Image: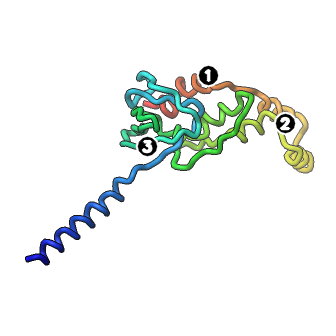
Amino acid sequence: MKRPLIFSSVMAFLFFFLLSFGFAATTLYVTADNAELKTESSSSSDTIVELKRGTPVTLVTTEGRWYQVTTQTSQTGWIYRGKVSEEQPDIEESGDDSAGVGGMLGGLSGSDINADAADSSRSIRGLSPEAKEYAQAAGTPKQSQDALDSVISRKVNEKEIDQFLKEGKIGEYAD
């Protein structure tokens, strides 16, 4: 009589123990500068709070391209999947707006756009000495080098990128 009771107790314990691993909380990290935690899974919904790059959040559920998450301060809301990652991002202190460009584009999941703060700041400096040397050795016309330097030196701020994403219905603004 005791054997079946012990066996069923052990089995119940193992079941709940293994089940708890299946529901282990997934920690995600905000990869965009000032990512908005929304009340609903829509870019047009109200913003609860802006989360800084590197902020850890706990995944609750997913809905399409949106994740419902809970912050360490127990605020629950929705964040676009392209603004979080399972890997903690490098946090670089920057005195200019160039990091914002990388922060906005760096986490676009499902996109071929890959930029980070280092890429953004490099582009502001223009071609590296090695790239200039290669262009000269390869016989790239000076006019082409100057045109590339001109494009690379252009600055785009976070507001302009956000407007571009909205108009192009890209990322969190996609239908």
Query: Measured from the top left, where is residue 156 in percent x and y?
Result: 69, 26
Residue 92 vs 96, above or below: the answer is below
Which residue in the structure is indicated by mark 1? 159
Q: Residues within 10 Å of mark 3 (few under 14, many from 20)?
A: some
SS for tag 1?
Answer: helix
Disc 3 to disc 1: CB gap under 8 Å: no
Q: Which residue lies furthest to the left in this view?
A: 1
Q: What residue type is labelled 2?
A: Ser
Q: Which residue is drawn at 42% across and 30% down?
A: 175
Q: Residues within 10 Å of mark 1 (few under 14, many from 20)?
A: few
Depth-wise, is mark 3 or mark 1 nearer the camera? 3
Q: How far apart are marks 3 and 2 (CA)?
A: 48 Å
Q: How far apart are marks 3 and 1 (CA)?
A: 28 Å
Which residue in the structure is indicated by mark 3? 58
Of labels 3 and 2, earlier in sequence is: 3
Of labels 1 and 2, earlier in sequence is: 2
Q: Which residue is drawn at 57% across and 29% down?
A: 34
Disc number placed over residue 17 in the picture, else none: none
Q: Along the horizontal axis of the image, is 115 left or right of 121?
A: left
Q: Which residue is drawn at 69% across and 39% down?
A: 92
Q: Distance between the residues labelled 1 and 2?
A: 30 Å
Q: Which of the image's four quarters has the N terminus?
A: bottom left
Depth-wise, is mark 3 or mark 2 nearer the camera? 3
Which residue in the structure is indicated by mark 2? 144
Q: What residue type is labelled 3?
A: Thr
Q: Residues within 10 Å of mark 2 (few under 14, many from 20)?
A: few
Nearest the eye: 34 or 55:
55
Which quadrant of the structure image shows residue 64?
top left
